[in-house]
Image (cartoon, rainbow, N blue to C red):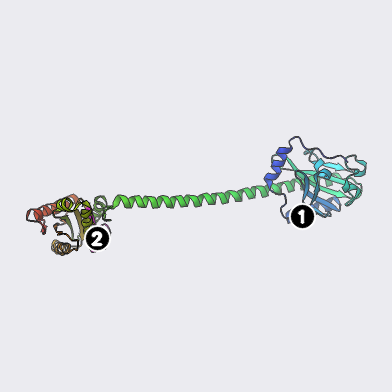
Amino acid sequence: MMRPRFPADEAARQATLEAYRVLDTPREAAYDDLVAIAAAICDVPMALVTLIDRDRQWFKSALGIDGTGTSRDIAFCAHAILQPDDTLIVRDARDDARFSDNPLVTGAPNVRFYAGAPLRAANGQPMGTFCVLDDRPRELAPAQRSALEALSRQASRLMELHRISRELHLQIEERSWYEQQLLHYQQVLENENADLEEQSSTDPLTGLANRRAFSRTLDQAIAQAHALGSPLSVAIVDIDHFKSINDLHGHAEGDRVLQSLGAMLLSTEAARGRVARFGGEEFVRLLPDRVLADATRESEYLREAVAAMPTGLPVTISIGVAALQPGEDASSLLARADQALYKAKHEGRDRVCTSA
């Protein structure tokens, strides 16, 4: 028996075969149907779709032969792949030096006739064969040979289709994974941006809105008030003698007073952004839908509440209140409230003053 040699480019051929991932896959009706057609057309009892692996011949589909394959050394198909552009035909294996003492010839299934058309990958590499076998010597008619070669091409296309389908499936899965990662990173980025926005809009000591955030809220509220013709007031709150608190009791105590006042102011406003720390010991309240008298009365309540805060220190506040005038913008409104605050300070502190 003559053992089949390896093709010159065996490494590339083997890599191509493995890339198709057909080896050791379950039987499939599509291949079984092609094998049955080949056996019927060629009038033979045996037909195979085989793949030549490193040291074995594996049957993707088999008709008339038991088992899942043979060793490569005794495979007729291992000889067939050495001529990938042609069909190998052995009319009588007993008269062919390559196969006369082959176990497949001398014993079951007693092969006499063999015809194998190579299964070629898209890159031209032979992966195995589509073959028909008989236990008696014979010939193939030209039409039968053409049919066998056509069925071999069909089986090759089927393998190529499965390869492409599998790669597309993997690409879809990979794309889905990347899309999920992208969504995750987008969410992380959005959360981080939200945190940054929160940090850039919030006073870190009191948790109130800062001047920047309050300015946006005030501009929107003024625009709405002008559009609807509704009243709006602002109140600027300043802690009296705050420098003395820091000097006499330390900055930690001063911070505690600021936090206490911030918490009280926040508890008086349901809508976030309507109260803010304007800087230092100065705070500002936005009072929508309040005319000057209402805003002044609420400010008096706040002044009295602050004086009663259990801080352990004598803490009072001065407040300047201004009501929005027709056509007025934020800078003018705040300037008038600040003038009213200055008046409260000038008149002795711990009081509420209004802007004319």
Image coordinates for residue 102, horizontal then vertical, percent: 88, 45
Judging by the rendered image, the residue that carries numbered circle 1 is 32
**SS type, badge 2:** helix
Residue 270 position (above or below residue 116): below
Determine if the magenta segment contains residue 203: no
Which residue is most to the right?
A: 95
- At 76% from the left edge and 34% from the top edge, which residue is drawn? 8
- Residue 226 visible in the current orientation: no
Residue 169 position (above or below residue 11): below
Q: Which mark is on residue 261? A: none
Please name whichever residue, 258 or 277, is drawn nearer the observer in this view of the structure.
258
**SS type, badge 1:** helix
- At 73% from the left edge and 36% from the top edge, which residue is drawn? 9
What's drawn in magenta, residue-wise? 262-277
Q: Callout 2 environment at 10 Å: few (<14), some (14 to 19), or many (20+)?
A: some
Q: Which mark is on residue 263? A: 2
First in sequence: mark 1 vs mark 2: 1
